[in-house]
Image: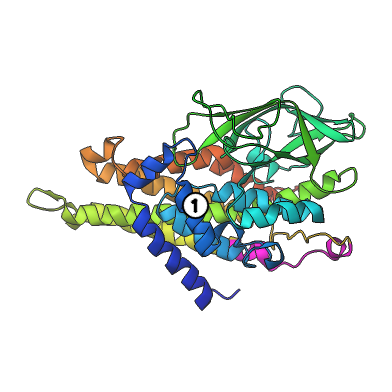
Amino acid sequence: MDAAFTEEQDEIRRTLRELLHKHCGGDEVKAAARTPAGYDEALWRRLAGQLGLPGLALPAAYGGVGCGPTELALICEETGRAVLPSPLIATAALAAPLILALGSERQRTALLPGIAAGELTATLAVPGDRLATALALTGPNDGDWAGGGRAGGIQARAHEGGWRLYGEAGQVLDGHTAEVLLVAAHTGGFARGRTLLFLVRAGRGESPDGRAAGPGEVPGLVRTRQTVLDETRPQARIELRDVPAELLGEGEGDGAAVAAALAATGAAAAAALAAEAVGTADTALARTVAYVREREQFGRAIGSFQAVQHRLADLYVRVQAARSAAYYAAWSAGAVPPRAADVERGGAPVRRAAEPGVGALALAQALEALRAVAAEAVQLHGGIGFTWEHDAHLYFKRATCDELLLGPVHRLRARAAEEAGLFTAGTREAAGA
């Protein structure tokens, strides 16, 4: 692994940081998060048009920039610094890689150029709160996490040459505005049951009661924006009542291929989210250091007290360690070439993580560092830091909600240990010997 970044990577980071510094102050972030879309649509179009953010990790053949998980992690670190409300994670880290890996050539050609240009946003919808499991971050995704033929999941059934979906998904990132929904649903009887991904071409817009009702909205589809602690990470509940859908890919669908693609996407998405958390933690720490240098108590700056210095030094070490882990996870996610079988099929290659559990471990370390930094930022800002209106709570809310979305941390670490075989019977016997 070459730890040095290229000139192109440094330029991407520098350009994005300058742009976000001009347009993403605390007040702008809060105002954008409280719009019906949940983000600044004009800024999103600018980021897509000038920097190509949505298509950064997509091939040039589909309108993308042709970079990889490392570059995606770098831009996520910068958007994390600004706590930017945007559909970047849902579109570029979750949905687009799955369309590239599993979609037919017709589907890729129809969707990916629009995503790369910022004209379409997309997201992944899974039943309940099983997103982390679907991405193989907190448990194996080869089970019945999409419903398993029982109530409470999302079911798919063949209907007149197409498919119909019935069920409900919660905690869908940017689900209230995304034009393309990738829905994980269970299909087939118990003997041949499998989980596949389906495309729903949704409309865009919101009615006054918070339910999506844009032009072209699919009959039977109800999307409701949920009230969440972190306004900068909007989520929605999606209800599907015999909604017409299209199978992602060709043929009858391969459940094993879907599970592999979700796991590969999870590894890269975990690296991107880890880098984003590191960026948020870095900014929170920098602002706290600046504050304790100015805030005086007992006639001197509180930053001059040794106890405060030790706490900040510990936080700095944790952030730097989390940054190294996030960078390694991003490199790992793009380091291993695709399997030969994937190339022989003629489809887009499915990349795999170089080492099992790397993404989950990096994400766990980054989320833990962000949580510690955010808590200390609130406390060291004193009385003003405890008010909801202060920007310190942007970081605190982001730390809390990200762990609820893809954690908790102990489950991420447990899954990584399981993948690495740390708790196998042979390991326990060797330890006992």
Q: Per the image, is 371 magenta?
A: no
**Residue 158 at x, y = what percent?**
87, 32
Q: Magenta: predominant secondary structure element?
A: helix
Picture coordinates of residue 428, whole percent (x, y): 71, 48
The front one of 165 and 317 is 165
**From the image, which quarter does the N terminus lie in?**
bottom right
Residue lying at the far left in this picture: please name it: 299
Residue 385 left/right relative to 373: left
Q: Where are the magenta residues, as a range?
A: 330-344
**Up-down: is 357 above or below 148?**
below
What residue is shown at x 16% (from left), y 54% (from top)? 294
Instruction: Indicate the quadrant where residue 148 lies.
Output: top right
Check disc 1 and report its element: helix, strand or loop.
Answer: helix
- Label tally: 1
Residue 287 percent across, percent down from the top left: 29, 54
Q: Is residue 420 visible?
A: no
Picture colour scheme: rainbow
Task: Pinpoint residue 330: horizontal percent, then vertical percent.
Answer: 59, 62
Most distant residue in the front direction: 215
Q: Which residue carries the number 1 mark?
A: 44
Q: Is residue 394 left or right of residue 330?
A: left
For the question of whether residue 75 can be seen, the reply is yes
Residue 135, quarter of picture: top right
- Residue at figure coordinates x 66%, y 61% from the top left: 58
Q: Amino acid at mark 1?
A: Trp
Q: Depth check: give the residue in front, 425 or 58.
A: 58
